[in-house]
Amino acid sequence: MQVQVVQADITTLEVHAIVNAANSRLAGGGGVDGAIHAAAGHGLMQACRELGGCPTGEARITPAFDLPARFVIHTVGPVWVDGLRGEPDLLRNCYRSSMALAARHGCESVAFSAISCGVYGYPVEQAARIAVDEVLGTPSGDGIPSRVLLVCFAEPTLGIYRRVLAERQTT
Ligand code: AR6
């Protein structure tokens, strides 16, 4: 599996699936969620409504409507409190569930946003370690994506993700 950190607006990427940092009502919002809904069009909100929400740490999949991607995987990251309320396990589950859904839908390329790293306040370096470890640790099996992009919108998130991935790849 090829894993890369890239700087991009995730709504522009031509990949099989993009992973949205959603909320548990799948009701749309700000940040990357707002950008994805704005670019995908009304069909995405309708499809999300039909799903009836998603618990923290889990993931759901919809078509991507007007986006260049084929699917949007909506995962709900934890709100960071102090790191002692299960936040790391919940964030790990976001990556695991999203990778499993991508595999089940035959997605060869998947682009993740930096789940929980915005308004949910997860410390970026810790979140980046979880993202990198979970993606690289995906058990091999039928249909697992061959290309995974970890998408950062801007500094300092980009630099932190780049360093964490480089450290992981040299150990
Ligand atoms: N492309 C890629 N990354 C982006 C984009 C974009 N177009 N826009 C923002 N980011 P956040 P969270 C980055 O706050 O912390 C929403 O309201 C951003 O710089 O979007 O999981 C939901 O509805 C940051 O690094 O997600 C939830 O209520 C990362 O995406 C809540 O926010 C994630 O920031 C989820 O909060």
Image (cartoon, helix red, strand yellow):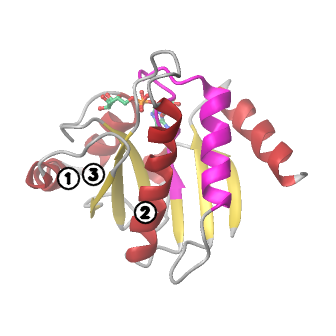
Residue sitting at x 62%, y 42%:
130
Residue sitting at x 16%, y 47%:
45
Q: Nearer the viewer, residue 101 or 38?
A: 101
Q: How far apart are labels 3 and 2 at the CA level? A: 13 Å
**Magenta includes 112?**
yes
Given the image, on which type of amino acid does mark 2 rest?
Ala
Q: Nearer the viewer, residue 81 or 84?
A: 84
Given the image, on which type of amino acid does mark 1 rest?
Leu
Residue position marked by numbered label 3 in the rendering: 40
Upstream in the sequence, badge 3 or badge 2?
2
Instruction: Please tell me whether mark 3 or mark 2 is closer to you in this view.
Output: 2
Image vertical order of residue 140 relative to residue 3, above or below: below
Image vertical order of residue 62 relative to residue 146, above or below: above
- Outermost residue toward the right? 170
User: Which quadrant is home to the N terminus?
Assistant: bottom right
Residue sitting at x 42%, y 21%:
119
Other residues around mark 2 within 10 Å, as few (<14) / some (14–19) / many (≥20): many
Upstream in the sequence, badge 1 or badge 2?
2
Q: Secondary structure at mark 2?
A: strand
- Magenta region: which residues? 111-137
Question: Relative to residue 11, is residue 145 drawn left or right?
Answer: right
Q: Are marks 1 and 3 in contact (CB under 8 Å)?
A: yes
Query: At which x and y percent is residue 171?
Result: 89, 51
Q: How far apart are labels 1 and 2 at the CA level? A: 14 Å
Image vertical order of residue 87 relative to residue 104, above or below: above
Question: Relative to residue 6, is residue 98 drawn left or right?
Answer: left
Query: At which x and y percent is residue 58?
Result: 34, 49
Ligand 1 appears in which quadrant?
top left
Residue position marked by numbered label 2 in the rendering: 17
- Outermost residue toward the bottom? 142
Q: Secondary structure at mark 3?
A: helix
Residue position marked by numbered label 1 in the rendering: 44
